[in-house]
Structures are given as C-alpha cells and as structure tokens.
Amino acid sequence: MNVTHLHCSACGKHYEARRLHNLCECGKPLLTAYDLEAASQTLTKDSLKSREKTLWRYREVLPLDDDRNRICLGEGMTPLLKAERLGAQLGLTNLYIKDESLNPTASFKARGMAVAISMAKELGVEKLAVPSAGNAAGALAAYAAKAGLPAFIFMPQDTPLANIIECQQMGAHVTLIDGLITDCGKIVAERKTAEGWFDVSTLKEPYRLEGKKTMGYELAEQFDWQLPEVILYPTGGGTGLIGMWKAFDEMEKMGWIDGKRPRMISVQAEGCAPIVKAFAAGANTGVDIPDAHTVASGLRVPKAVGDFIMLDILRQSGGNGFAIPDAELLAAVKEIAAAEGIFVAPEGGACLPALQQMIANNEVDQDERVVIFNTGSGLKYLECFGEVAR
Ligand SMILES: *Cc1c(COP(=O)(O)O)cnc(C)c1O
Ligand SMILES: [Zn+2]
C-alpha cells in the first residue's frame, strides 16, 4: 500500500515494489521499505483503538495493495498474558507470555503466511511450495486452501504427526523426506522453475517477514507504547526476531516509540543452536550444524539465510543466546502449563530454562518487563510427551 521499494539486507541493492521477488541476486534476504510518513497519516495510535482484532489493523504498514486479495483467517492480535504465578516462582514481578498459539493453525507461522499468500495472490502466483519442519507447512496449507491455490510441501519424515495430517486434510501435496529441512529446501530450489512453484521459504520471499513484524507492533500497543526490557524468542529461521526489530524501527520513525530497545534473547535447542553458538563465538554468520536434532521442530533450522541479521540484532540490543537441551525444554512445557494454563509448544517451553539461566547470571532485574514468546501449541507435538498411563 505504502511500499516504496525493496532493498537487500546485505548489499543494499534496490528492487521494484509490486513484482515477485525471492532473494537478492547476492543471495541474501530482501526487506520491504514504506513511505512511513504517508502511512502515519491514517495509521495512528488513536485510530488503532477501533480497528479489527487481526494483524490487518496495521494495514498501512503491510505490503498488500488491494484488499480484495487479502487472505485472512483471523491471524494476529494474540493475548499478552501476565504470568503471575510463574513470575512469582521465578521472583519476577512483570513476566508476560505472548501467546501465539491462538493464531489460526495454532502457531505464529499464520502471521507470515497470511501476508505472503495474500501478496502471492495479488502478484499472480499460481502454485506455492515450501520446505518446512512443521508449522510453516500447516500455515501454508491453510492459507493456500483459503486462496484456492495448490501448495506443494516438503517435510522431514520426523515432522510432528499433527503437521503432516493437517496439511493432508487441507488438500496440500505433501512429500515426506528422509533428511533435514535444508534437504527439503534443496528439493524445492531444484524443482521450482520446472514446476512453476513460487518458493515461500523463510526469508526467501520478502512478505512472511512483514506478517511476522506485526508481533512487534502488537507488543508496543499492548504495553501502551513502552517496549518491554527483555524479549525471549525461540529462534529458527529468525523471521520473528528480524521482523520485530524492523517494526520497532518503523514505529520509531513514525514517532510512536523512543530509541530504547528490548534486550533480544535468542533461545535455541542444544541439538541445533547455530545462532547461539555463533553469538558466543563472536561470529557474524551461523555455525554449521551437521546433525541437527531436537523435538522442537520449529528450532530445527541448521542454516538460516538471515543469520547475519539476527546476530547483529542480538549484539545491537545487548541481548544474548541460550541453547537448551530437549529434556529441559520439554520439562519446562509442564512447568509453564501447570502454572499458567497455557499448553505451550516445546519451542515456547525452551524460553523458561533460558530465563532461569538469565536470573542465575543476574542478567535480569526482578521488576523488568520480560516477555516469553509462546510461538505455538503443545497440541501439535503430542508424541513428544511420551506414553500416557491409562
Ligand atoms: C517456526 C517456529 C519457530 C521459529 O520461528 P522463526 O521466526 O523462523 O525463528 C519457533 N517456534 C515455533 C512453534 C515455530 O513453528
Ligand atoms: Zn544483495
């Protein structure tokens, strides 16, 4: 709507708006730029008070031109819940959970796919494809179904059963691969030209990021335009982390918030922690993970195309990274669920042991506002929780 152009996150090259784009010719992700002055004529803090309770409330800073192309299942504007009991157990007075499991298809992948598939429809795409370790596939299947477009989905064989079944039920073409998400990505890359697929992999098209950035707008709005001090984010491909940072920047340019930023904390699984390890090593790109493994399938991303952007954000924000063993992140699901009534995904669970380490290291003050992102629902991961005694 107010998009002026796209530009490369690495080399800065400009690209025209209203055209289909994947990566920059240099191989790095493209970012969407807006005329924020024009956007802020109608998108004001006051106008938000009466807008719809979906991410489309931030319409002026989303890329779609024509509302008739909007594919909406009610995504966004998820609750920011104060975690009183869990907070008390940890000695924190201002702990919050942003509960993304209430999105369509029960994960925050809905935000990205809603905007990406709407844009794909607007720009005339006929077939969609994605490699996914789980929730991105479910979200693509849902939005493609709603858009009436075919979806070709490649998932590792050990993807949670719920993701496989939901994709099949939503009419997607599902192929299971004996390998990692990176292997699935290679198949999509090799076949997409011949098959006429548009690749909606994380950060390989520019608009999933735009959908995910709305988490940053919502946090600001829900905290009455005072960003929290700490955000713990379970990090895979990093769209949420990068998107929220972009949203903070846009809001500052529109004069909505000041220059203070939350400390951004990347939480990964010990079996796949390329960003956390690279951060600790002072590196600018992700560490190679040859045998990535974790039950938290959303974190099973051994090589992220936006790794350098994430590392930059962690450093700029004074943040940190933590790698959590599977046994601990699964145990944390029960702790959060039993204290707060939210059956979090293992990815969301991983934030709790990370926060406990921060508290032990004196990296967080007891009155600071700390936000844990629960990025999905535990209901999608039932096989991770072991046998049920009947
Ligand atoms: C995809 C996913 C993640 C990782 O998200 P990114 O924004 O790509 O880093 C975390 N949790 C869940 C449940 C996911 O599905
Ligand atoms: Zn470039």
Image (cartoon, helix red, strand yellow):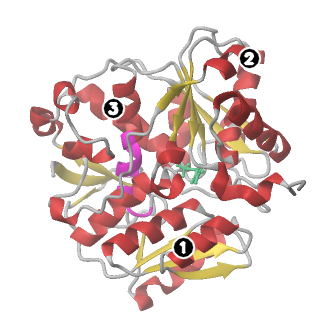
The residue drawn where x is 76% and y is 38% is 334
Does mark 1 have its CB less than 8 Å from ligand 1? no
The residue drawn where x is 50% and y is 58% is 105
- Tag 1 near tag 2, CB within 8 Å: no
Give the left or right position of residue 337, taking residue 263 as reference.
right
Furthest residue in direction right, as rendered: 389
Magenta stretch contains residue 181: no
The residue drawn where x is 51% and y is 18% is 229
What stretch of residues is rendered in magenta? 204-214
Seen from the viewer's position, the closer of residues 204 and 354 is: 354
Estimate how packed mark 1 is, as few (under 14), some (14 to 19) or many (20 or more) residues with alpha carbons within 10 Å. many
Relative to 333, is 72 above or below? below
> Which secondary structure lies at badge 1?
helix
Query: For residue 249, which numbered disc appears in the image?
Result: 3
Kind of residue at badge 2: Gln
> Which secondary structure lies at badge 2?
helix
| Residue that label 1 marks | 167
Query: For residue 89, which numbered disc appears in the image?
Result: 2
Give the left or right position of residue 11, taking residue 107 as reference.
left
Whether residue 280 is visible: no
| Marks 1/2: CA–CA distance | 39 Å
> Which secondary structure lies at badge 3?
helix
Relative to 199, is 319 above or below? above
Image position, residue 31 (x, y; %)? 34, 51
Magenta stretch contains residue 207: yes
| Secondary structure character of the magenta stretch overall | helix
